[in-house]
Image: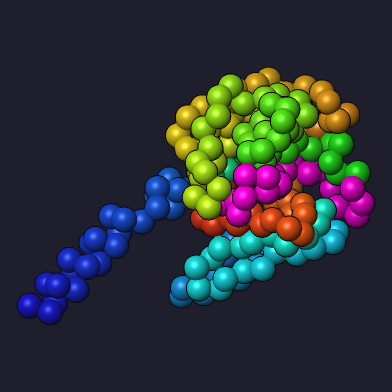
Amino acid sequence: MLRWLSLIVLLFMTSCASAPEKEGFERILSEHEGVYSKHGWNHYGPGYFDLDRETGIITSHGGMGLFWYSARKYGAFILELDFRSSHPEANSGIFLRVPEMPSSNEYIYHSFEVQINDAAEEALHRTAAVYDAEPASKNASKPGGEWNHYKIIFQGKRIQVELNGEKVVDWEAEPRGKIRDFAGEGYIGLQNHDWDTTVSFRNIYVKALE
């Protein structure tokens, strides 16, 4: 009986494995035997991200800084992750194709940022916008304190953003706003922006498309 019960539990756990793991995605916040680590990540600038090693949740503090995955650059890719803001005015974002190792704030002019900030007055600076370049077509955010899910596809010059299952950006990228130019490949980074609010992330997966 115990043997059959163990088999049922194993099958259940396998069937509940996250879709990205089944589809060839790589979990880039590493996990081994239930313990998470920041292996492969670096931080530039003031502030920091702390990590709950048991849940794999990382949380921003202070800034403005960038927590970036230094193990490899990505050109065409799909990025999926969950995020949660402590307050509607919490400010963060996901940087795409940071061209070189950050050594100053110059990277913000050469890489696109998918924004997190529900309280921003301008659509170009609100959650799911490609910051200062292309606004989201609708507001698909959940209230502060709830988990949201991003699916971001960057292939060639085309950026697509899905927020909580709704496509809100489908844009042929070009230099616009603060963006002077952008590279064909680069690093992925998470922004920490201010001291009085926090943004948390979990379940960070990437699938290279080339």
Q: Give residue 139's position: percent from left, percent from top.
A: 55, 29
Q: Is residue 31 at all visible to an observer of this figure?
A: no
Q: Residue drawn at (84%, 41%), measured in percent from left and top?
A: 108
In this view, the residue farthest toward the left is: 1
Q: Does the magenta stretch include residue 151?
A: no
Q: Is residue 112 at all visible to an observer of this figure?
A: yes
Q: Residue drawn at (36%, 56%), measured in percent from left and top?
A: 17
Residue toward you, 21 or 121: 121
Q: Residue drawn at (31%, 56%), measured in percent from left and top?
A: 16
> Is 42 left, or right, of 114 in this rendering?
right
State whether residue 18 is above or below residue 93: below
Residue toward you, 173 or 22: 173
Indicate the quadrant containing the C terminus: top left, top right, bottom left or bottom right: top right
Q: Give the range drawn in magenta.
A: 82-105
Q: How many marks?
A: 0
Q: In which quarter of the image is residue 127?
A: top right
Q: Does the magenta stretch include residue 93?
A: yes
Residue toward you, 125 or 185: 125
Q: Give residue 62's position: percent from left, percent from top.
A: 78, 60
> Is 133 left, or right, of 161 in this rendering?
right
> Is 2 left, or right, of 75 in this rendering?
left
